[in-house]
Amino acid sequence: MDRLSRALEAIDAANADDPHRLVIRGVERPKELGHAELASEWLAVLRPDAPEPLVLAVRAHHVRRWAIPRSSYPDGRSGYLRWRKALKNLHVAEVGRILGDTGYDPATVARVQDIVAKRGLGTDPDVQSLEDVLCLVFLETQLHDLAARLTPEHAVEVIRKTLPKMSDSAKAVALGLDLPADDRALLERALAAPTGPPPARPGAVS
């Protein structure tokens, strides 16, 4: 087994411990393992020539995310932002440990960590690719449940806040998603409406 395969296997093993479950395309999986596998699938669609650090970063983007639950921080924006910072630090540390254990050099480890932390978002094409696959995973796996909790108008607004994060190619792929008719209608409404800049507070897909 080559180094990349060993690293991906180790990332998957870490995510397989997620106690939360999610049904993706009819198959129940540990939530973060399923999200990571789906993100890798979308990366292969958007960037079939993706460099190895990006392949690794996409698979490890939320590694062991459940280890720091939102409830461990206070309610409100301040608590939310502290939680998000703690998560980012966790993901960066975990992927660094895994890649170090599988023999990656420090420069490659640092590059993967930069992508996972989204350093250079807006200027780094690999970080944009990570953002694109996260948005597609969100639309495929979370939009339906979100729409069920919100009014159609509020759901469209949430989607509209996601769209500026996506590249044009990712938006085109989004239109081809196999979504329930009501969810597709919401997505098409959001795409047809003018969009502003991304929201100051990170959204559900970040």
Image (cartoon, rainbow, N blue to C red):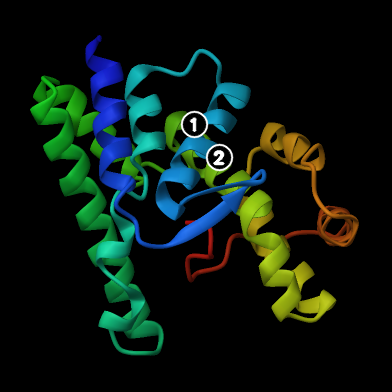
CB under 8 Å between discs 2 and 1: yes
Depicted 146 relative to depicted 26: above or below:
below
* Tag 2 secondary structure: helix
Camera-side residue: 81 or 141?
141
Q: Quadrant of the N terminus?
A: top left
Task: State the residue at coordinates (27%, 75%).
Answer: 82
**Depicted 137 relative to depicted 197: above or below:** above
Classed neighbour count for the residue bearing mark 2: other residues with Cα under 10 Å, few (<14), some (14–19), many (≥20) = many
12 vs 43: above or below: below
User: Which residue type carries mark 1?
Assistant: Ser
Q: Which residue is mark 1?
A: 40
The image quarter in which residue 97 lies = top left
Residue at mark 2 to residue at mark 1: CA–CA distance: 8 Å
Identity of the amino acid at label 2?
Val
Task: Tell me: residue 96, above or below residue 145.
Answer: above
Residue 5 rendering spot, x and y as whole percentages: 30, 18
Q: Which residue corresponds to the image point at 59% horizontal and 32% vertical from the top-left?
A: 42
* Horizontal side of residue 87 vs 120, given as left or right: left
In this rendering, the label closer to the viewer, 2 or 1:
1
The residue to which callout 2 is attached is 133
User: Which type of secondary structure does the marked residue at label 1 adopt?
Assistant: helix
What's the residue at 26%, 81% (across, down)? 72
Q: Residue furthest top?
A: 2
